[in-house]
Image: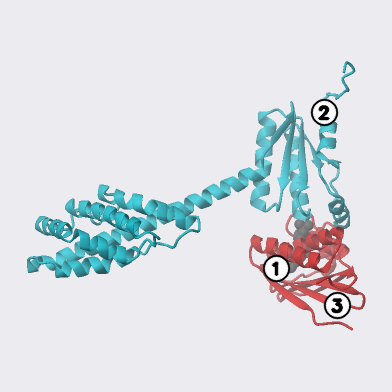
Chain colours: A cyan, B red
């Protein structure tokens, strides 16, 4: 994508070479990147300018995918990451345009190149902005995706307690998405590990309302269809009392006070017994 | 006899609103000195009514009020929506009745959990459910 005629590009290259220091200084003064150390800022501006010069030389000032903009990528990368992590402000790339155009207007050049050159310089800064925006979008999409994954994963670890005995400790507020993920995860593991008993531990659930109760009942029903019996453990006294008053009936679902009790019951159900070692 | 109630308002427009109502209710309940059992009852009732506001009422608002009574403090939760209203209140309050594939225990259960319960509704005009929980003793500051 060549936007600018060859002679103009040569003139621009000459301009960038001749006014290199001035541009770097003007860009640094624009305080686009908000570094504490001015030397860092100058280094980054110089790196940016190197890439800009390359893109213009190749007539690729409007193409963020061009090799010339890879320098900008490496400058923007840490800044975008910093902003995503809540450190530092968003770089104001648009502020690079005015000093660049001012210096270009002062530059001694054939008059018929003034407009085309300004367009090319303006385009290159716009492309930098576009690139930054793309990088920010990628970064936030990435952040959201990984947080969501972490959350879903965190909330639904299925633990193998014994051959054929699985436990899933449910934690926090069970919104529809997380309880859905928990159920799917558990059912998959029941099949994969040929589990006979699955323990749903709700020690970490602060309140059991009708939605949570219905979720437990549905999960137990699905598990039964896969050949596993469900046990609910960790119902704390205040939750038990509240559930009774709410009118929730867990039906035939086995319940145990603690995870340990549930494991004992599960072992019994799977034909295992824990006995004291008489030889010690 | 009574002092001016403290009011907190929590909008319920999405699932996150239900979580915020629960958190706000628990905070206020703890500050007033409700027992752990009562806190759990309050939070559970709030969760039910907030979800009804969202699911059946199309969203609305929860108001939390504190009322000083002689020798006790009352925590009142008011859930208000401008949804379709409840046509048959008696039916809606029946254990196990749900128009939406739920357990049908939210409304009736909240009534059992609360010390006082009030339901105002009109077809096409919305629903307001008020539940009051009374803690013994004056509010701890
Ligand atoms: N705010 C409301 N606006 C309109 N209809 C409501 C409202 N609250 C409750 N209802 C009606 O009353 C019925 C019973 O409510 P209830 O909370 O007991 O059950 P549910 O919400 O359907 O299921 P769940 O047991 O999960 O709460 C609802 O199915 C609904 O038809
Ligand atoms: Mg309900």
> Which residue is under mark 3?
B68
Mark 3 residue's CB less than 8 Å from ligand 1 = no
The chain containing the residue under callout 2 comes to: A
Q: Is residue B71 shown to the viewer in this render?
A: yes
Q: Is A84 on the left or on the right of A266, as rendered?
A: left
Residue A127 place in picture, x, y as percent: 29, 58
Q: Is A149 on the left or on the right of B23, as rendered?
A: left
Mark 1 residue's CB less than 8 Å from ligand 1 = yes
SS label for mark 1:
loop
> Which residue is under mark 2?
A267
Q: Could you say which disc has been placed on residue B57 in the image?
A: 1
Q: Residue furthest left?
A: A110
Q: Nearer the viewer, mark 1 or mark 3?
A: 3
Neighbours of disc 3 within 10 Å: few (<14), some (14-19), many (20+): some
Residue B44 place in picture, x, y as percent: 79, 59
Look at 25% across and 50% down and name the residue there: A68
Vertically, is A231 above or below B130? above
The chain containing the residue under callout 1 comes to: B
Quarter of the image that includes the C terminus of chain B? bottom right
Marks 1/3 same chain: yes
Number of marks drawn: 3
SS label for mark 3:
strand
Neighbours of disc 1 within 10 Å: few (<14), some (14-19), many (20+): many
Q: Could you say which disc has been placed on residue A148 in the image?
A: none
The chain containing the residue under callout 3 comes to: B
């Amino acid at each position: 994508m060549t936007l600018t005629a060859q002679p103009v590009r040569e003139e621009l290259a000459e301009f960038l070479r001749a006014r290199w220091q001035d541009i770097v200084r003007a860009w640094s003064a624009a305080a686009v990147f908000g570094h504490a150390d001015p030397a860092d800022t100058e280094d980054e501006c110089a790196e940016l300018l190197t890439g800009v010069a390359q893109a213009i030389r190749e007539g690729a000032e409007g193409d963020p995918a061009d090799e010339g903009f890879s320098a900008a990528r490496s400058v923007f990368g840490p800044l975008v990451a910093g902003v995503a992590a809540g450190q530092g402000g968003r770089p104001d790339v648009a502020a690079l345009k005015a000093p660049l155009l001012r210096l270009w207007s002062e530059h001694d050049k054939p008059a018929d190149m003034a407009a085309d050159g300004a367009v090319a310089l303006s385009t290159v800064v716009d492309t930098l902005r576009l690139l930054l925006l793309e990088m920010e979008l990628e970064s936030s999409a990435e952040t959201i995706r990984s947080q969501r994954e972490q959350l879903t994963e965190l909330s639904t670890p299925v633990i193998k307690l014994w051959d054929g005995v699985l436990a899933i400790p449910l934690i926090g507020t069970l919104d529809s998405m997380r309880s859905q993920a928990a159920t799917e995860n558990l059912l998959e593991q029941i099949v994969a590990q040929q589990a006979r008993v699955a323990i749903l531990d709700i020690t970490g659930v602060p309140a059991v309302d009708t939605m949570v109760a219905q979720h437990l009942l549905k999960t137990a029903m699905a598990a039964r269809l896969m050949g596993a019996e469900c046990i609910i453990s960790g119902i704390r006294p205040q939750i038990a009392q509240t559930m009774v008053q709410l009118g929730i009936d867990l039906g035939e679902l086995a319940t145990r006070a603690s995870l340990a009790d549930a494991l004992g019951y599960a072992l019994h159900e799977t034909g295992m017994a824990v006995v004291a070692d008489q030889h010690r | 006899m009574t002092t001016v109630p403290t009011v907190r308002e929590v909008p319920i427009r999405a699932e996150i609103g239900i979580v915020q109502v629960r958190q706000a209710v628990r905070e206020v309940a703890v500050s007033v000195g409700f027992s752990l059992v009562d806190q759990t009852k309050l939070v559970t009732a709030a969760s039910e009514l907030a979800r009804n506001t969202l699911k059946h009422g199309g969203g609305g608002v929860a108001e939390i009020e504190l009322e000083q009574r002689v020798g006790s403090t009352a925590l009142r939760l008011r859930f208000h929506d401008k949804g379709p209203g409840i046509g048959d209140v008696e039916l809606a309050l029946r254990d196990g009745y749900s128009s939406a594939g739920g357990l049908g225990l939210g409304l009736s259960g909240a009534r059992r959990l609360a010390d006082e319960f009030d339901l105002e509704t009109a077809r096409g005009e919305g629903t307001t459910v008020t539940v009051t929980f009374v803690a013994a003793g004056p509010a701890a500051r």
